[in-house]
Amino acid sequence: MHKLILVTMTALAVTGCTYSHHGSGDDRSIEGAGLVASRNVDIAGDAEFAGMLVRVNGEVGRDLSMAGASVRSDAKVGGDLEAAAARLRFTGEVDGDAELAGASIDIDAIFHNNVSMAGAKIELDGLIEGELEIYGHNVELKGEVRGPVKMIGQGDTENGSLVLSGRFMGGGAFCATEIEVERSAEFAGDFVFVADAEPANLPAGAVFEALDGRECDRIDL
């Protein structure tokens, strides 16, 4: 996950977009780079795109990697997904693991495995069948997470805020300066909440711990 957090986004010094294919059959893959990298794909192998504006739709048989200032995708990914952008929007489906990083992340997708993400502002909807790990400042979790979930609030001066309105079926731990649990939220399993003040609507049996001036990423959750 940290390799995505450390990615520095830079404008590419080209005006068009170049694509290259390699391999054949199930090994056939594609790479695209340019100021605008936009493509509808149907490829059996891997796909990799980089540019200021990246738009990728269609089907990728194996891994998909995207990086840009603005990245949007509605792709079906048979392998792993890696995406890093200042603004990231993904509405597709991923069979493998997903690693996402961006200043603003908006996700409404289906993930059949584990998901990790880091961002200043994160809105997550859809379905996650595996584990979910999030490092963020302003985070809203909707949709359904079937595996364990861990949210670590971050920020220059505070630990951020978290709003929970989805279904969390595998237990987990949440740490942020402010945590809001909406009445629509559903929980199954063991949960730990760490915040400045105890949230209303905590699930039965959940453990609350006062943040007491600590930093979330220094707490063993």
Image: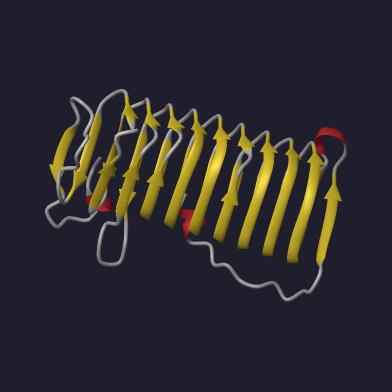
- Toward the viewer: 198 or 52? 198
- Toward the viewer: 139 or 82? 139
Q: Is residue 57 visible?
A: yes
- The quadrant holding residue 147 is top left
For the view shown, which residue lies furthest in the bottom direction?
A: 13
**Which residue is rendered at x = 14% and y = 41% of the image?**
209
What colour-coding does the image apply? secondary structure
Name above or below for residue 41 compared with residue 5.
above
**Which residue is rendered at x = 55% and y = 34% of the image?**
111
The image position of residue 102, as x and y in percent, is 50, 58
**How many marks on residues?**
0
The image position of residue 149, as x and y in percent, is 37, 35
- The quadrant holding residue 131 is top left
**Which residue is rendered at x = 53% and y = 46% of the image?**
107
Name above or below for residue 174 compared with residue 39.
above
The image position of residue 46, as x and y in percent, is 73, 43
- The quadrant holding residue 42 is top right
Side (left or right) of 49 relative to 155: right
The image position of residue 207, as x and y in percent, is 17, 33
For the view shown, which residue lies furthest in the right direction?
A: 24
**Which residue is rendered at x = 25% and y = 40% of the image?**
221
Side (left or right) of 101 relative to 170: right
Q: Is residue 68 visible?
A: no
